[in-house]
Image: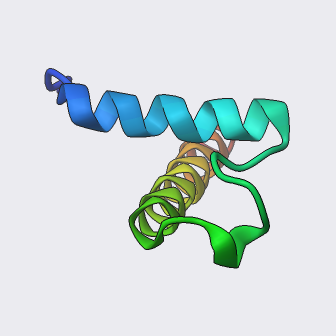
Amino acid sequence: MKRKQDPEVQEVISMVRLCQAMHTLPQAGGLLDQDALFVYLLERVLLADQKKAELEAARTQAKAQG
């Protein structure tokens, strides 16, 4: 079931993806120099990506077995 995405969530995901693509962070300095909220949201997006990859791998494995 697909839900309509919240615009704020879309913006956070877009910002994280842009940082990944550009290999940079939004502010000067390293990770510890970033805004704490951004670091928290970055972590949440990366955890969601990991969970999605695990679910897709399990689905692929189940299809291969059955």
Quadrant where the image shows the C terminus: top right
Quadrant where the image shows the N terminus: top left
- Residue, far front: 28
Residue 52 is left or right of residue 23, and the answer is: left
Residue 33 picture location, percent across and down = 66, 72
Relative to 13, say whether 33 is above or below: below
Looking at the image, which residue is at 45% across and 73% down?
Answer: 36
Looking at the image, which residue is at 57% across and 43% down?
Answer: 56
Residue 2 picture location, percent across and down = 20, 23
Relative to 20, say whether 52 is above or below: below
Looking at the image, which residue is at 78% across and 64% down?
Answer: 29
Residue 7 is left or right of residue 44, and the answer is: left
Labels in figure, total: 0
Residue closest to the eye, 22 or 65: 22
Residue 3 is left or right of residue 42, and the answer is: left
Residue 46 picture location, percent across and down = 57, 57
Quadrant location of residue 41? Answer: bottom left
Residue 40 is left or right of residue 21, and the answer is: left
Residue closest to the eye, 6 or 37: 37
Relative to 59, say whether 28 is above or below: below
Looking at the image, which residue is at 67% across and 78% down?
Answer: 32
